[in-house]
Image (spheres, rainbow, N blue to C red):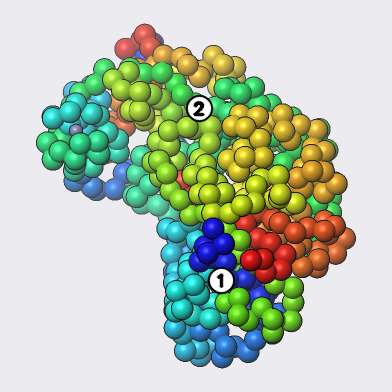
Amino acid sequence: MSLDLDILTVRIPPQDNPECEFFWQSGADGKLRFKCCQDCGYFSHPPTPRCPKCLSTKVAPEAVSGKGTVLSFTVNVQQWIPGQAPYMIALVTMDEQPDLRLTALLVGVALDSAPGDVIGSRVETRFLSRDGIYYPTFVPEGSPA
Amino acid sequence: MSNNPERLSFISGIGRSASGRRLGRTAMDLTLEAALEAIEDAGLKREDIDGIATYPGGDAIASRGFGGPSGQQVQDALRLDLNYIYGSGEGAAQLGAMIEATMAIASGLAKHVLVFRTVTESTMQGMKGRNPGQGMQAASGFMEFLAPFGAISATNWFAQVAQLHMHKYGTTREQLAQIALTCRTNAGANPRAVYRDPLTMDDYLNARMISTPLCLLDCDVPVDGSTAVVISHVDYAKDAPKIPVHVNAVGSAQYGRPSWDQYEDMTSMMAQGVAKQMWSRTDLKPADVDVAELYDGFSIITLAWIEALGFCAQGEGGAFIEGGQRIARTGDLPINTHGGQLSEGRLHGFGHVYEAAAQLRGEAGERQIPDAEVIVAANGGGPIAGAMLLTRGISS
Ligand SMILES: [Zn+2]
């Protein structure tokens, strides 16, 4: 059975921002993309118009594997929004580059897991489509499609 | 090194309004109360004030009580002519406003700068609820890649720092608890603190979780209140009525990515660069510090400052505060002697500076640390950081 990614009572959408539109649309074909420098190959996040490493303007969205390793996480318990069930947020280091990180929801991991079982664990990316936006969502690597 | 420009400044006056939960007073009302007290405390008249600096500037209603009146609004309310004005949320944390004031004085732009910070978050939350994402139609700025993923509260962002610190260094909740317990004990000796009842380890461990591993008692308490200081040129020190609180060194550095989740060492924060820069501007050493007033919006921030300032090595903060004796008022490094934001209330950084000045002057009453001569005050967490090293009396 596939994982339910729609775990937030209220989703705050990103602002309209031409710089980042590709990121929020990227999941349409099931792939996660980051800006990547066509000159030096450096991935960066959040997106900027120049490569933050070599300052090249030749930066373009490029698909990544969506796979990574959990650097840290938290289980949000407080009901900032009434009725919201606890959920897990994770900070993930993507496989493509040691300093390419993304914060997103992590779904499919028991909320009472020992921290040592979550940190360092392998995850991959799925997408929740809502109102024309594709929210990247992490799930344990190898989770049912 | 003694030529550091910040040493041309000292804190001549301190003031604060009533503070507490849901006072129902306006931000301007609180601000003027604090400002006039600070000006009088400095032995000055309002027309002597020729500069204003504040954090973050802007409008209290729009920011849900996070910001007080703008500098210009206070200028107008007091009908001042100013040689200098500054207000920004983007400086060296809340302390950035004070650091700017020292530089305005050093450069000759102003002689007496009124610096204030006002919050009415408690009243605003009473009116509008506590959901930090409430009213947010779309996430922009630094929230753009946090809020859409449910990371809507600063608790979430700092929780990940705490989680990694615990995982990597073996820091325990019992160790982290000492920040909250120490603050509460100190608040017991501070009549202005919001929470003064003693707190036990059991209370801490049984408190409800907010965002793992941070529980309710790891989070500070929103209040209403205004804090003000007057920063003056050292030429005025001989005429000032109170013991001068000298600015020995400041730290305003921003090294590494200014981000809640992209900073390289996620067990720490921008505090690292600020501390490094501050120590590079003085001959004083961490061992010379008598008291540390360290920002505690969340307990983990205080731990990060202890490490960043070099009171112990990175990762050894848990062991350093274990048992709480070392950071107690009777210990080697008393911290947050007023109870911090965890127990006195979130005056948002300026409460720590007010307390530092009161301690250096010997005005801290029941909670006075004997012979306090060197105090570090640090503000901010995550990508926000600033620090000041303050001494009792003007040193050369
Ligand atoms: Zn490049």
Rendered location of residue B392, percent (x, y): 72, 65
Q: Amino acid at mark 2?
A: Phe
Residue at image location 46% in from the left, 78% down from the top? B108
Q: Is residue B328 left or right of residue B129?
A: right
Badge nearest the viewer, 2 or 1? 1
Q: Is residue A15 left or right of residue B284?
A: left
Chain of the residue under label 1:
B
> Could you say which is closer to the camera, residue A73 or residue A86?
A73
In the drawing, what numbered circle is on residue A73? 2
Q: SS class of the residue under badge 1? A: helix
User: Do pointers 2 and 1 mark residues of a single chain?
Assistant: no
Q: Quadrant of residue A99?
A: top left
Above/below status of B109 relative to B374 = below
Rendered location of residue A2, percent (x, y): 37, 14
Rendered location of residue B177, percent (x, y): 73, 36
Q: Which residue is mark 1?
A: B8
